[in-house]
Image (cartoon, helix red, strand yellow):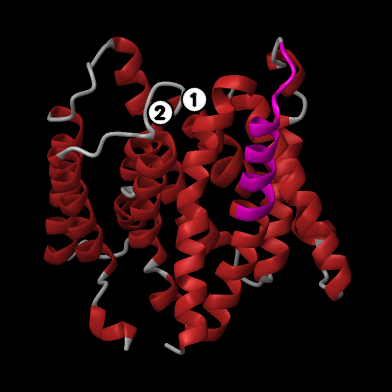
Amino acid sequence: MRLKDTAALLFLAAIWGSSFLFIRIAAPVLGPLVLMTLRVVIAGAALLLYAFATGTDLAIKTHWRQYLIIGLINSAIPFTLIGAAELNLTAGYAAILNATSPLFGAIVSAIWIHEELALKKLIGLVLGLVGVAVVVGLNPLSLSGLIILSIGASIAAAAFYGFSSVYVKVFGKGIRPLALATGSQLGAAVWLLPLAPFAWPDRAPDLTTVLAVLAIALLATALGYLIFFGLIERVGPTKTLTVTFLAPVFGIIWGVIFLNEVLTLSTVVGFAIILSGTAFVTGFSLKRMK
């Protein structure tokens, strides 16, 4: 890849990894439901303005049903689940569990569109499960009922991402990437906005929380989508897929630097196993990056 595209890929991984940091900061103050409502509303509005400025046809009348469904399964539900999980899990921990998304995507692809689960993919799935077991079982976190539920919510979010990736592949054909990004965020807002008033926080957010909300909406979501789809257009989906490996690394780094989160050996080992499994499932190879 050109230096410009490599830099864009690293920047995308950095800002997507930072979303776990911002969620960890803002979710305890606003609650996961209100936080994610603000995230999709602000991001959707920013993307809508960009679409208008660039003359992009969103084809809402044609694809509104898909925008609602994709917004639900790819944003509203998994965003909220991650927000709920990070009330009790560290940003790095949540980022690691989220790295299992491609593993769920492989399972859904095999069941739904009958994509072959070759031996390499099966090995990857087993490695992914082993990696999760290492992260969860050997982590110093006390496995109370609340922690187990939080881990389950984080893994469920990854499962929704895996499912939605296949859904978009089947039903998102013909929809322009920017239109899909914008429509899905607006669709997620339709689902979350009616629920937000029932979970409104008791106190006003401080400046740090407000900045975290703006960062996750404008930086990690709106700008992140624009960079992501731009990379797909310029370098192709295979090379862009490497963000799957890089974003959790940044999620861990930001948690350690800004939140003083502890990085244990078991976390590093488990994460390495998960990434190895993901590489097997996706067929990732460093040779393809050249």
- The one of 15 and 234 positioned closer to us in this rendering: 15
**What's the magenta region?**
203-219
Which residue type does callout 2 highlight?
Answer: Ala
Label 1: which residue?
84
Membership of 37 in magenta stretch? no
Figure disc tally: 2
Label 2: which residue?
153
Q: Quadrant of residue 93?
A: top left
Name the main secondary structure of what is drawn in magenta.
Answer: helix
Membership of 210 in magenta stretch? yes
What residue is shown at x 13% (from left), y 41% (from top)? Answer: 265
Relative height, residue 62 to residue 34 (above, below): below
Which of the two labelled residues, at mark 2 and mark 1, occupies the earlier sequence position? 1
What residue is shown at x 40% (from left), y 37% (from top)? Answer: 91
Q: Element under label 1?
A: helix
Residue 132 coordinates in the image, percent (x, y): 20, 39
Residues tagged 2 and 1 counted as in contact (Cβ below 8 A): yes
Residue 234 in view here: yes
The CA distance from mark 2 to mark 1 is: 7 Å
What residue is shown at x 69% (from left), y 15% (from top)? Answer: 201
Q: Element under label 2?
A: helix
